[in-house]
Amino acid sequence: MTESVRPASSANEPQTHLHEHLLVGLDWLDQGLTLFDTDLRLMAWNRRFLQLLDFPESLPKLGTPFEAFIRHNALHGEYGEGDAEQRVRLIVEQARAVLTDQTEWVRPNGRILKLHGEFLPELGYITLYTDITEQRALEQVVQQHHAQLEDSVRRRTAELEAANARLREASEINSQMTAALQRSEERLRLMTDTIPALIAYFDHEQVYRYANRGYADWFGRRNEHIVGHHIEAALGIKFYAAVKSYVEQALTGARVTYEYSMEKEDGSTIFARSTLVPEVSPEGKVLGCFVLSFDITEQKHTQAALVQAQKMEAVGQLAGGLAHDFNNMLTVVIGNLAELQNRCGQDPQVTEFLEPALHAAERGVELIKRLLSFSRQQPLEPKTVQIGGLILGMMKLLRRSLPENSLPENITMNTALGETPLYATVDPHQLESAILNLVLNARDAMPEGGELLIEATRHPLTEEEAQDCQMQVGEYIRISVRDNGTGIDPTIQMRVFEPFFTTKRFGSGSGLGLAMVYGFVQQSGGGIRLDSQLGKGTVVSLFLPCADEESVPTGRLNFSGRAGGRDKPLVLLTEDDPEVRRIVRLQLTGLGYPVLEAENGDEAAAMVENIAEIGLLLSDVVMPGQLNGRTLADFARRHRPHLRVVLMSGHAAGSSVSHPSLQAVPILEKPFTQEQLSQVLDEVIMCQRPL
């Protein structure tokens, strides 16, 4: 309602403003309101009155007669059919006669209004209009539910009365039912004690009233030490401090879920997820809380293992991606140094600088291999290995070499290999390197001396161990290197297998030892596990696939003869890196091979098609353009079936050849020496294989 339809009296200006303010205030009421004087003329109203009865804002004015509103309703069918004027007169007469009135009015639109009118002496009639539609609907629903409940209670009462009558008639049946009830309670207790959940209940004073067996066992308590005691007294100050805020929040009526960890007596950490569900009385008072908890220790370990695996995979991909470029660079460095050594090897001054440079380059090659081994991209040569024999064969070497590496004299080294021979499918050279790394780490962990033990057993891997090691359940050969040294801090145990992470002082270790062991074992189809406690020592266990019996490994044929006395075929050398191409060309010409060069696969393919004299294709695997080494080899095989092919790769991931016709293609891993190149080419030529 706008101010224009509420004219103010000009007789008393302050009183006018007060009247206007009063009307504005009435508009804030959620109920409709009208005030008619003793002559039934309108003195005050609010917007809610107009909204509830659908009156236009132009209708109400100071002094509007009551019958104007009744007539408006009658003309709009508010009172049903019939003589509208007669109905208006009747309602107005009734209004004059009634001093106090409370009634409910159902409007044509279905809304239910409650009218409460009172006569105010010397002022008139004031009426409140309240929309109670939703209230009546809710009351109806409640009444229906109440009726249903009463019906259910009546039926249940009848059933109970009949049951009581039967019980009174037969005391034996009563005894049987009592016993059955006791058994039911016992079964309920048994169920709650055996389900894989921790269940408890505490009241509003934080005193336990119930705890199942799993809950008591989780905290290492007896049930009687929990039930009847305050949370702090039952479970300890440290635990209560961790959960106090959650308990207090739940006792306000909120449902709370949280996680917590707890250290057991053996030093291990366990994790749980708890939900507190308040019990609320019909009056809204919180009586206590139900506790439902689950052991999520295994889930936490799985999540940590997944994060670790993803981290290792990411670093492995980085290592594999860098290997190709590093190997190309090392090919150029080693090739040039080797050529310089061939030409000036007799000069002592040149040799003084050449030998350390070659030695450093060879260490770079070994570093790349270790990185690739970590990323599981270094090709392995698995064989059936007698584990006990391999370890015993290493012991002599270890005992002879470790003192030279400052192994304390008061460190005793022993083995526990058992009497039954154990066989595993593994690359023996990589395994020896892994064991050596573990032994050196154990030595460094015992600066004051101690005991070092190497064990080998057949070990059936449990489901829990398999999840920890990310392996399949089954039997494996377990090789453990055990020391009683300083141990490893639990906060860094998850990082020890990361490349370049080391606990040694700067310059004392590259941080690749355990990373290499991890990558080798994973690539071999096995797993690795580390158990360590500060001040008590460390055990690193390798799990390798079992082999039932020793078999003769099948390897690559070695040829003692050389093709030096034969006519050397024309070699097509395909390499996109000009420096690598120059070095390999020098190696080929030094071996007496005539050489043609191509800097990419497309150029080499054209030469294969047009130069019939080409007898051998030596190509890099990774090259730009439409044709890489594999597709070029496949192209050459289809167009020149008798053409011999050798591939070069600076990245082990590029060493796999998927096409069936190329499975036997030899692959030279960069960097390689002239002797290695000569051996491969001799084998290809002497075997006369049509590659």
Image (cartoon, rainbow, N blue to C red):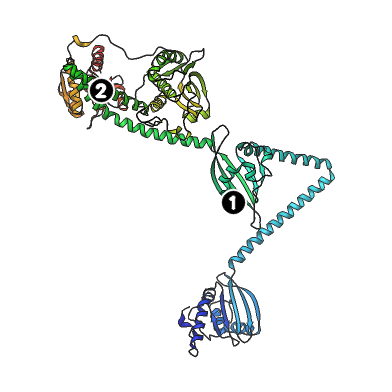
Cα–Cα span, label 2 and label 1: 71 Å
The x and y percentages for residue 323 are 29, 29
How packed is label 2: few (under 14 Cα within 10 Å), some, or many (20 or more)?
A: many
Q: Nearer the viewer, residue 661 or 465?
A: 465
Q: Quadrant of residue 336?
A: top left
The residue shown at (76%, 50%) is 159
Residue at 62% from the left image edge and 87% from the top image edge? 122
Which numbered marker is on residue 248? 1
Residue 560: x %, y % from top left: 27, 9
Residue found 61% across the figure and 45% down from its top: 291
Regarding residue 587, the answer to whether it shows in the image is no
Q: Mark 2 or mark 1: which comes first in sequence? A: 1
Which quarter of the picture shows residue 268? top right
Which of these two is toward me, 107 or 511? 511
Residue 629, image x, y percentages: 25, 26
Q: Can you say whether 202 is above or below 400 in the image?
A: below
Circle number at residue 525:
none
SS for callout 2:
strand
Res. 122 visible in picture: yes
- Residue 373 rendering spot, x and y as whole percentages: 36, 25
Relative to 15, is 52 above or below?
Answer: above
Relative placement, left or right, of 285 versus 55 is right
Q: Quadrant of the C terminus?
A: top left
Residue 662, quarter of the rendered image: top left
- Horizontal relation, residue 654 to residue 415: left or right: left
Extreme bottom residue here? 11
Please name the amino acid that badge 1 sits on.
Glu
Q: Are marks 2 and 1 in contact (CB under 8 Å)?
A: no
**Residue 647, disc:** 2
Secondary structure of the residue carrying tag 1 is helix
